[in-house]
Amino acid sequence: MVGGVLLLGVCPYPTMLLLADWLLRHSVVMCLLLHSLVLMTFCFHHAATSCSKNCYCSESSGGLKTVRCSNKRLTEIPQDIPNDTHHLYLDFNLITVVPTNAFLELPLLSELDLSHNEIAKLEPGAFRGLSSSLEFLDLSSNKLMTLQPEAFESLRARTNLSNNPWHCDCALHTQLPKLELQPVSFTGIVCHTALPEEYKGSPFLLTKDVDFCIVLKKTTDVAMLVTMFGWFTMVISYLVYYVRQNQEDARRHLEYLKSLPSRQRKSEESSTISTVV
Ligand SMILES: *[C@@H]1O[C@H](CO)[C@@H](O)[C@H](O)[C@H]1NC(C)=O
Ligand SMILES: *[C@@H]1O[C@H](CO)[C@@H](O)[C@H](O)[C@H]1NC(C)=O
């Protein structure tokens, strides 16, 4: 009984110690191995693709890098796009705004696809840094209603602006010529809403003889004329009413004046005139 206890108490103890020791040493080694393995995979992966999370990167034979982040439910523009990207596809996402300096770190970017998003706002300097490299910009199928020239600065890319809910008015008409974009960029702007409303649904073209600002001026002029005419009519009717009311009195008064001696008559006449006026 005592021996058994001794055997159980003493004998397994060194064995367990040895086992623990073995495990400890090996687990440390294994842990280290695993750790370096993970690190290596990460490093190799990173070196091999150097790509943004959620995006697919590829390189053409000419060494031009393409980054595709299409249809990823992105709500904003990723900040980890490799800086040697030439073509960037961010289409079919949920991006609502292009912030200032969004692409400043991408000096080689020549094609940028932002179509089929929810973009309603381009902040000033949104495309800063792309003026010399960018050749094609796709902003089609978004939520743009108007354009701020400050967003484009000196960008000269061909720009697809079609299928946006454009509000065609004097502001858009004056802002478009301030952009340095290629003229072809302005095709595809169809007025979703317009002022004046008759241009709703028609294409907005700078070269067309429709000047939204002149139309606006005309509208204001007409409004002014109508108002002035209204006032004028009111004044005239009041005068007519006044004259009619006083005609009889005035005639009688004049007759009375005629019957007076001439000197007194003069002063009386002037007072009558002032009353009438
Ligand atoms: C990209 O960034 C790296 C590291 O900052 C830099 O060495 C390289 O010149 C950059 N490439 C371009 C095209 O700007
Ligand atoms: C512009 O975008 C529209 C809608 O996405 C498309 O149908 C059209 O082909 C595009 N135009 C150009 C020149 O890429």
Image (cartoon, rainbow, N blue to C red):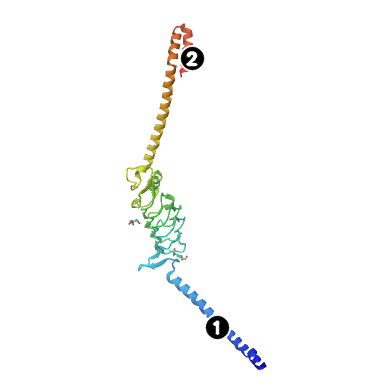
Answer with mark 1 or mark 2, whichever residue precedes in sequence. Answer: 1
The disc labelled 1 sits on which kind of residue?
Answer: His
Residue at x 46%, y 16% (from the top left corner): 273
3D distance between C-alphas at marks 1 and 2: 125 Å
Query: Where does residue 112 sit, x and y in percent of width and height?
Result: 39, 59
Q: Is mark 2 within 8 Å of ligand 2?
A: no
Q: Looking at the rendered structure, which numbered label has been put on residue 271?
A: 2
Left or right of 267, for residue 198:
left
Which SS class for mark 1? helix
Residue at x 42%, y 26% (from the top left corner): 234
Residue neighbourhood size for the residue with mark 1, other residues' Cα within 10 Å, grouped as few (<14), some (14–19), many (≥20): few
Q: Quadrant of ligand 2?
A: bottom left
Q: Quadrant location of residue 59? A: bottom left
Residue at x 66%, y 93% (from the top left corner): 3
User: Which residue in the protein does label 1 denote?
Assistant: 26
Which SS class for mark 2? helix
Q: Is residue 198 above or below residue 81?
A: above
Position of the N terminus, as image quadrant, is: bottom right
Q: Is residue 178 above or below residue 76?
A: above
The disc labelled 2 sits on which kind of residue?
Answer: Ser
Query: Where does residue 71 sit, x and y in percent of width and height?
Result: 40, 62
